[in-house]
Image (spheres, rainbow, N blue to C red):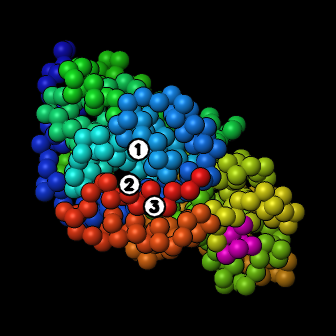
Amino acid sequence: MTTDVTNTFLTKLADFYAPLSSEDIPKEVMEKARRVLVDFLCETAAGFKEGELASIYNAYARETGGKAEATILCDGAKVPAPNAALAMGIMAHSIELDDGHRWGTSHPAVAVVPAVLATGEKEGASYAELLKGIAVGYDAMLRAARAINPSHLKRGFHSTGTCGSIGAAAGCASILKLPPERFAYAMSMGGLQSAGLQEMLHDHPGIKPLQPGKSAHAGVLSAELAKRGAKSPRTLFEGHHGWLKAMCASEFSEDALVGELGSRWEILLTYTKLYPTCRHCHAAIDLAREARSLLGCTEKDAESIFVKTYTLGIVEVGRIALPETFEEAMFSMPFSLALALRKGNVTLQDYTPELLRDEELRRAAALVRIEADERMNALYPEERGAWLRLALKDGRVFEKGIPVAKGEPENPVSDGDLVEKLTAMLAPYYPAGFVEGLWKLCVETTPEKVEYRHILDHFGRFRTS
């Protein structure tokens, strides 16, 4: 049977997204987009300082040069828009503090926002148009990711990379105001460039930011090509050799992909990260912090540490007990729990070479035993929790489980929580005025009074080597 190419999953999405103006986007969605943006900008600023791959790519982008279309934030170089998007995606994902979506097991900001900002700067888009592009890009990316997971993840794919290129293309197509047919072509080209494997978690995880960076790059490129007349399969998703067959062997949810358009905005279902680790560590870290507070203990008092959680989390964060590098530490639940017991928190500044070598922290990390729990496996991804049993040398015991970590839609962070996170994260690198000024621009000022150049100027005033 021949598929009607004008009535596919892709065209349904494009027909909905393409006509939207910023006034059509619900107020709560636009407000969430403002907070998403400031979170992303601060992660980019931290990643510029800490990201090894970021420094490598930024130097390469400057050497390569090209038409001055969009600015690499923090660096200040103005390069072709796809290259600026790639650079910012790498920087923002370098510290594992960017937002995420548990149903799609992916990080939307680092794929979508760099593409939207680079295209928006090139086109002179208004602040409201940037926010609309972010909302649309998130929705397209996360609907695709929700539709194919957890099957997709179990096959070894990195959803941020594979789904991010679709969302980035949609966000850029929104900025360019492409009509429905060309909007669909842009998203299709983004899907054709889907790429990303989880294997990077098991050897040199510092390369992980390349995948969302490439998604952002692909999004800019796809929208620009569609604008210029390039065409691409409208049967991207359900085609005989299509995306759904390739990415999840057609084990997908149609409702997740195209259901409730306009009433279910995926950006409202994202989480905010408070710790610079893979999200699968966070519920256990929340419990370790609570145990420390209640028992008045540190890692030195621990006799045994037992965690139960879901298998997919263990695969990503349960295999490295004694990390040797900052990048490995971000994917080590055992070491993160030891840090939480030592510090009462886990921050970007806790992954120093001295602490990574600390004998007592390593002793506590070696105590951690992690097991899969079948009930948690059955509830995933509706719940992504953990259960912790901490036994102390003096015989006292803490036992508790939670269904989701702090920052999820059911347990959200407040504006105060977010400002506290961003301020602490950037304190070693920037004065307090950096975060204060960004927050005022991105969140508090009336959108009609904000332009992207104001954000660029703000970064320029605080630029350091």
Q: Nearer the viewer, residue 58 or 297?
A: 58
Residue at 24% x, 45% y: name it: 124
The Cα atoms of the two marked residues, 2 and 1, are separated by 8 Å
The Cα atoms of the two marked residues, 3 and 2, are separated by 9 Å
> Circle 3 is placed at which residue position?
461
Label disc, if present, on residue 146 of the rendered structure: none
Q: Which residues are magenta?
A: 339-344
- Give the amino acid type for the residue marked by disc 3 in the picture: Arg
Residue at 67% x, 48% y: name it: 327
Tell me the quarter of the picture where residue 454 sits: bottom left
> Residue 6 at what x, y percent from top left?
13, 25
Q: Is residue 232 magenta?
A: no
Q: Main secondary structure of the magenta part?
A: helix
> Circle 2 is placed at which residue position?
456
Nearest to N terminus: mark 3 or mark 1: 1
**Is there a contact, CB below 8 Å, between mark 3 and mark 2?**
no
Question: In this rendering, does residue 112 appear at all?
Answer: no
Nearest to N terminus: mark 3 or mark 2: 2
Q: Secondary structure at mark 1?
A: strand
Q: Nearer the viewer, residue 174 or 456?
A: 456
Q: Residues within 10 Å of mark 1 (few under 14, many from 20)?
A: many
Question: In this rendering, does residue 300 appear at all?
Answer: yes
**Is there a contact, CB below 8 Å, between mark 2 and mark 1?**
yes
> Circle 1 is placed at which residue position?
71
**Is there a contact, CB below 8 Å, between mark 3 and mark 1?**
no
- In the picture, measured across the screen, residue 244 lies left or right of residue 2, that is right
> Residue 263 at what x, y percent from top left?
19, 55
Q: Secondary structure at mark 3?
A: helix
- In the picture, measured across the screen, residue 366 lies left or right of residue 105, that is right
Q: Is residue 343 magenta?
A: yes
